[in-house]
């Protein structure tokens, strides 16, 4: 909740479309969006190679890395992300957003190099958990940039473009790491990826300097919602503004205010539905995270090929985002998109049920995994962020960051527990682990379908439709 508290000196902002000041215009906004997409793709590298790394770690006898360790690793990575969201996720509200992302990528690169020298599983995991905690600041930072510097771009398209580059980076990181494993050990491969992260930070700093975009490293003053919509710059009096109303998230000053705020939002049916949707999404993602390990242990692919196939299966996620960008570019109404996403998640239910019910072949497993990624990604990027943005607009509360943080934090905690259970099942039998992961995917896609159906029928949806 501290993320929602404005400073009277104008040194921070809500970092959402509700309080936005565009400091670049016209073609420059396209350049900033392009740079943001590339920068966020670099943010994925330090964490995107996790799935492709598992087979190599499990084959290293010196680490004593077991399938159960992989489950702990996956579960702790999710809990680390949740911890980061609930503790430092508000940093982009008070520090320059581009700087936050650059610092994370730099630290991520250094940590990957340090991880390559670790001799025990415990120290390896501990170092990578630091990276996952810091990673939680990058999505709010990216959304803050969209809100404060790209006010002229439709938010759905901006979110999906950033998501598209994120998924491409996830695909690329697995393929890159698998390709490196064809020639080097996993330790050397980690060092190469770490060096790439560090080099990208240097490159972005040079690009910002040469492009005269140093203002991207500055804090952005807050704007009232009405001014943000008009693109009007804030005056000192506007920044200070009137005293917050009791119902506004910005009025949170003490633990009592936090308690009152939480009681209020947890009485909102649509907010509870968003939490359920996010939990379903996290449950459905578990199978995809263990794909590389299953390809190696069950289908007997090599370590490098498992990592490469894991990356290529993520093309389904990329195609889902391309579909989303296309339908919004063609002017499809938001409510129609919700029905499209429901159709996708229903297909995801069928895919998960197929894996649960049948002993699928290698080629069929690759196809089904690709389709599963296609069915969950578009809704994963749109449903929670857009509903939080528009609900805050409808209620004039300005608590977008707090809503997103609470929803994602709770969902990730549940998702982490499911990863641990899959790891425990794998420790006794790989096929049991695959079955459990598929069951979680079936449960998750079912929850996503049901909750989105209820959200679309919720009376507040009529208010959201005016945003189209």
Image: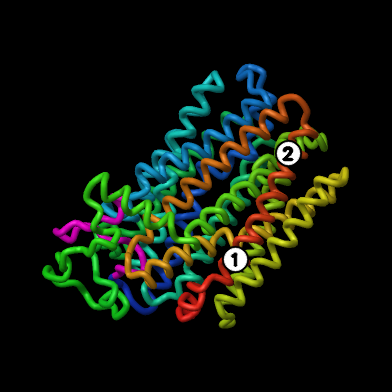
Instruction: Assign a secondary structure to mark 1.
Output: helix
Residue occupying the point 65% across, 61% down: 450
Residue 2 on the magenta segment:
yes
Q: Main SS of the magenta segment? A: loop
Lateral position of residue 454 relative to residue 207, left or right: right
Magenta range: 1-20
Q: Which mark is residue 34?
A: none
Residue 462 on the magenta segment:
no
Which quadrant holds residue 164?
A: bottom right
Give the residue at mark 2.
436
Relative to 113, does residue 328 appear above or below in the rendering?
Answer: below
Q: Classify mark 2: residues with Cα within 10 Å, few (<14), some (14-19) or many (20+).
A: many
Relative to 356, does residue 423 appear above or below in the rendering?
Answer: above
Lateral position of residue 262 relative to residue 384, left or right: left
Give the residue at mark 1.
454
Residue occupying the point 69% across, 44% down: 440
């Amino acid at each position: 909740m501290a993320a929602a508290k404005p400073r009277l000196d104008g040194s921070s902002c809500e970092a959402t479309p509700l309080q936005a000041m565009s400091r670049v215009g016209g073609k420059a906004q396209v350049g900033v969006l392009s740079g943001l997409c590339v920068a966020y793709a670099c943010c994925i590298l330090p964490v995107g190679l996790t799935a492709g790394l598992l087979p190599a770690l499990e084959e290293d006898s010196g680490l004593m890395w077991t399938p159960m360790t992989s489950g702990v690793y996956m579960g702790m990575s999710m809990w680390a992300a949740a911890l980061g969201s609930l503790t430092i996720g508000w940093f982009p509200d008070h520090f320059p957003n581009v700087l936050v992302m650059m610092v994370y990528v730099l630290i991520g690169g250094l940590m990957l190099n340090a991880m390559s020298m670790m001799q025990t599983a415990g120290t390896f995991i501990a170092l990578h958990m630091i990276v996952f905690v810091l990673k939680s600041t990058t999505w709010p930072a990216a959304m803050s940039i969209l809100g404060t510097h790209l006010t002229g771009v439709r938010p759905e398209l901006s979110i999906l473009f950033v998501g598209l580059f994120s998924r491409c980076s996830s695909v690329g990181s697995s393929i890159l790491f698998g390709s490196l494993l064809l020639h080097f050990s996993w330790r050397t491969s980690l060092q190469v990826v770490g060096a790439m992260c560090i080099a990208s930070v240097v490159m972005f700093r040079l690009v910002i300097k040469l492009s005269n975009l140093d203002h991207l490293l500055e804090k952005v003053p807050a704007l009232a919602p009405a001014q943000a919509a008009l693109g009007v710059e804030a005056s000192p009096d506007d920044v200070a503004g009137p005293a917050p109303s009791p119902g506004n998230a910005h009025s949170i000053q003490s633990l009592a205010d936090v308690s009152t705020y939480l009681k209020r939002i947890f009485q909102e049916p649509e907010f509870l539905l968003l939490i359920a949707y996010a939990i379903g999404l996290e449950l459905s993602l578990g199978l995809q995270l263990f794909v590389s390990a299953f390809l190696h242990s069950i289908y007997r692919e090599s370590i490098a090929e498992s990592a490469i196939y894991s990356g290529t299966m993520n093309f389904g996620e990329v195609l889902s985002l391309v579909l989303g960008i296309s339908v919004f570019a063609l002017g499809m109404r938001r409510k129609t998109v919700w029905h499209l996403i429901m159709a996708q998640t229903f297909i995801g239910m069928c895919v998960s049920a197929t894996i649960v019910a049948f002993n699928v072949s290698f080629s069929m497993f690759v196809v089904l995994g690709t389709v599963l990624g296609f069915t969950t990604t578009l809704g994963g990027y749109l449903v929670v962020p857009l509903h939080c943005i528009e609900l805050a607009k409808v209620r004039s509360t300005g608590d977008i960051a707090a809503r997103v943080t609470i929803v994602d934090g709770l969902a990730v905690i549940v998702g982490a527990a499911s990863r641990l259970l899959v790891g425990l099942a794998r420790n006794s039998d790989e096929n049991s682990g695959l079955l459990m992961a598929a069951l979680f995917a079936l449960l998750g896609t079912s929850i996503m379908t049901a909750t989105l159906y209820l959200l679309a029928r919720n009376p507040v949806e009529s208010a959201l439709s005016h945003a189209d």
